[in-house]
Amino acid sequence: MEFKQSLAQRIIIAFALMSALVAGAFAMGIVATVHLVEEKLISAGLGGDLQRLLLMDSVEDWRHRPEPDQLFYFSGGRGDFQLPKDLRHLDAGFHEVFRDALSYHAMVEIVDGRRYVLLQDQSDFEERERVLFAVVLVGFVLSLALAVFLGWVLARKVMAPVVRLARQVRHRDQLLGLAPPLAPDYAADEVGELAVAFDATLGRLRQALTRERLFTSDVSHELRTPLMVLASSCELLLENPAIDSRGRKQVERIARACEEMRELVQTFLMLARAQHDDTTMSPQVSLAEVAEGLLGIWRDPIERKGIELFYQPGNPLDTRYNATFLHAVMGNLLRNALHYTEQGFIRLTLEPTGFVVEDSGVGIPEDKREAMFEPFVRGNEKRGDGLGLGLSLVQRICESQGWVVSLSTMEPSGCRFHVELSHVKS
């Protein structure tokens, strides 16, 4: 069973249920015991009174009379002592008799075939029972309220170190290398063990982050040199007049691929180092500038595939965005559209605070839309050698910048990616 209440609420509920169970059992036991004892006492008292009435000199002359709240009847009695019909079926022993609106306790004796019945009004007894039930009910409610209060106090005491540990764990400074360990602040109990486990896990996390920073810095530094060599070589080859048009196009493709790889390395480096707010690492550009630059790169491969490319410049605001990230997001969406579209169109539409990339490709099933932004997830139409990282990179960049990317289907087929840049971080 899954509990949606907090741990403190569960402690209070446990105290209340335990109190209700114990107090309820005690209340029922008290009521049953008192009722049984009082019934035994009443039956014994009535039996004694009946025996007293039976001590007589003769049937005709009584020396003893019943008490004012008692009624006495017997078989063959005269006048008020005549046994009523509604009492003639009673067996010997103690009974409870209801007559009209009143109730009586009855004791019956049979002597030599003659039936003697003594009735006693139980109004006083019922009044005592009502008082007893009221006292027991009030005690039950008070014990339940006391249990809830004690549970609340205990929950606060018990949960105080857990809440403090949770606040410390959520604090960003715990990821810093100079952050002090948490375990010395707690006793050697379950919470202390949790703090020790967190310190150990946090230590391994710090080491992993350090290794990642070193790795990304080394990779970035090592890849920039060969990429620069490739870019310089492409420039020299393009200046050579001996290269024919076909070779020139191939060199231009290599140069574009080198530029894309350089930007991709820069994108991953910025994401890994969490330096997306550092404007010195990437220039700031407008939405239209990035769109026009990418159209110059993708128009030729799109049209060579026989797909129509539509561009609607719209009226975007003159807001400046991180060039590396915006270029990576829009470029990956255009690449994804080309990858999964065999015929039809690809449309890029600019909006005041965002853009839309639409295509008439194979589309994405509804049950896989959310998963498409996860790493290594590809559409049903698996093409080429892609690893399914493009949309995951788009999602990571949008989350880091405060942008919003959404996916919807086109009719009769295709995808529509909408990127809202209005939430850009300042």
Image (cartoon, rainbow, N blue to C red):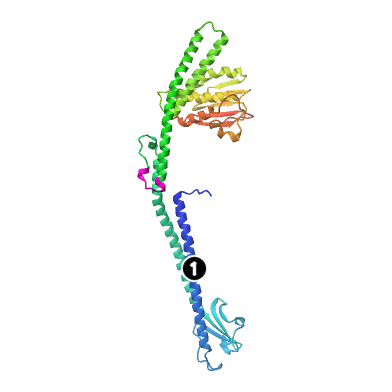
Name the spot of residue 378 as percent of width and height, x first: 58, 30
Q: What residue does disc 1 label?
A: 29
Determine the secondary structure under disc 1: helix
Tell me residue 104's x, y (percent). Answer: 54, 78
Magenta residues, dominant SS class: helix
The answer to whether residue 317 is visible is no
Relative to 111, is 14 on the left or the right? Answer: left
Q: Residue at x 55, y 12 (%)?
A: 249
In which image quadrant can residue 177 be found?
A: top left
Mark 1, residues whose alpha carbon is within 10 Å: few (<14), some, or many (≥20)? few
In this rendered view, identify the residue nearer to me: 385 or 423. 385
Residue type, numbered disc 1: Gly
Q: Position of residue 71 (x, y in %)?
A: 53, 84
Point out residue 227 in the picture as x, y percentages from the top left corner: 47, 17
> Looking at the image, which is closer to me, 110 or 196?
196
The boundaries of the magenta stretch are: 183-192
